[in-house]
């Protein structure tokens, strides 16, 4: 268990926005000559890649998992429905020696998402420091942030986006040609707008928030805004109006009363 106030870092943005690039940068960034502490890191895509060839171990998170607890936490998560019931879940996985196996290959991506949600809930319950990557396509990610705040966590939000979903579609297709993770075009566009719809609300849960634009092809991403809560209020770094992208003006600035 972490001593002191635990931290949660959320790296959010639509598919193809450049979250991985930002994460790599933050991992190398130093604050007071120390690397930023990520704690335990959760990425559903990484989980899926592992499940394609072998089991996924919970030991790396210093957690103990049982099928009974796994089923219970997933049942309470909202990820099950009439199309995918608890019985369907039980049929696609097995936990043995604190590792989980996918028994039905077509369900790997779904199981990976479920495992990621389970890990977030478990780590939060045990007040461990952790970070996760998300396309922010579902309000459940806001719920995790809210639960973390209620549990006494400091929540750090890193949000990266581009000026249009067409940029994201192009980048995902280019990535797929190089062997990367494929995402259907309709999902990329839908998730783009869902993520932006959640941006303002997510920011209200953050102790610190960092906003990045990654629209420029072949160029570096740009952090154009950052705030930190001081004495209960947002304290913003100086912002150059010319650097603020349209997506931020539309989905954040316009919602400030």
Image (cartoon, rainbow, N blue to C red):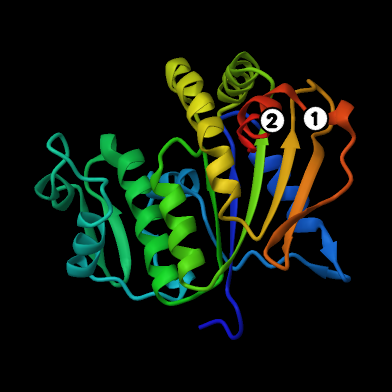
Is disc 2 in contact with disc 1, using a CB cutoff of under 8 Å? yes
Taking 47 as reference, is 67 above or below it? Answer: below
Residue in the foreground of this view, choosing between 257 and 194: 257
At 51% from the left and 31% from the top, the residue drawn is 197
Left or right: 76 as drawn, with respect to 90: right
At 19% from the left and 47% from the top, the residue drawn is 92
Task: Give how far across and how far down residue 168 sits, in percent.
Answer: 61, 22
**Given the current orientation, which residue lies at the most extreme left position?**
87
At 37% from the left and 47% from the top, the residue drawn is 112
Residue in the foreground of this view, choosing between 14 and 211: 211
Mark 1 lies on a secondary structure that is loop
Local crowd size for mark 2, using a 10 Å CA cut-off: few (<14), some (14–19), many (≥20): many
Figure quadrant of the C terminus: top right
**On the image, numbered disc 1 is attached to which residue?**
244
The image quadrant of residue 221 is top right
Residue in the foreground of this view, choosing between 92 and 40: 40
Task: Give how far across and how far down residue 30 sits, in percent.
Answer: 84, 63
The image quadrant of residue 18 is top right
Taking 79 as reference, is 166 above or below it? Answer: above
Task: Give how far across and how far down residue 27 sits, in percent.
Answer: 74, 57
At 27% from the left and 38% from the top, the residue drawn is 107
Local crowd size for mark 1, using a 10 Å CA cut-off: few (<14), some (14–19), many (≥20): some
Left or right: 171 as drawn, with respect to 59: right
Mark 2 lies on a secondary structure that is helix
**On the image, numbered disc 2 is attached to which residue?**
248
**What is the C-alpha distance between the residues marked 2 and 1?**
7 Å
Question: Looking at the image, how many numbered discs can be counted on the residues?
Answer: 2
Q: Confirm whether residue 73 shows in the render.
A: yes
Task: Give how far across and how far down residue 256 sits, in percent.
Answer: 64, 38
**Given the current orientation, which residue lies at the most extreme front position?**
257
């Amino acid at each position: 268990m972490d001593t002191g106030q635990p931290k949660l870092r959320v790296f959010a943005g639509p598919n193809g926005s450049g979250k991985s690039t930002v994460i790599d940068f933050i991992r190398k960034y130093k604050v007071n000559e120390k690397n930023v502490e990520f704690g335990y890191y959760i990425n559903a895509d990484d989980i899926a890649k592992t499940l394609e060839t072998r089991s996924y171990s919970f030991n790396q998170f210093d957690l103990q998992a049982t099928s009974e607890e796994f089923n219970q936490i997933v049942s309470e998560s909202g990820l099950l429905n009439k199309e995918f019931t608890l019985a369907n879940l039980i049929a696609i996985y097995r936990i043995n020696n604190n590792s989980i196996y996918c028994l039905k290959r077509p369900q790997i991506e779904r199981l990976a998402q479920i495992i990621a949600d389970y890990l977030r809930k478990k780590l939060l319950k045990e007040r461990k420091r952790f970070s996760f990557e998300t396309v922010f396509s579902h309000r459940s990610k806001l719920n995790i942030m809210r639960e973390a705040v209620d549990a006494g966590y400091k929540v750090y939000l890193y949000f990266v986006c581009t000026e249009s979903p067409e940029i994201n579609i192009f980048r995902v297709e280019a990535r797929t040609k190089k062997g990367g993770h494929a995402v259907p075009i309709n999902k990329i566009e839908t998730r783009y707008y869902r993520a932006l719809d959640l941006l303002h609300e997510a920011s209200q849960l953050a102790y610190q928030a960092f906003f990045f634009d990654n629209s420029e092809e072949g160029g570096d991403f740009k952090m154009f805004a950052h705030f930190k809560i001081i004495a209960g209020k947002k304290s913003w770094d100086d912002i150059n109006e010319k650097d603020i992208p349209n997506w931020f003006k539309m989905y954040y600035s316009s919602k400030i009363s």
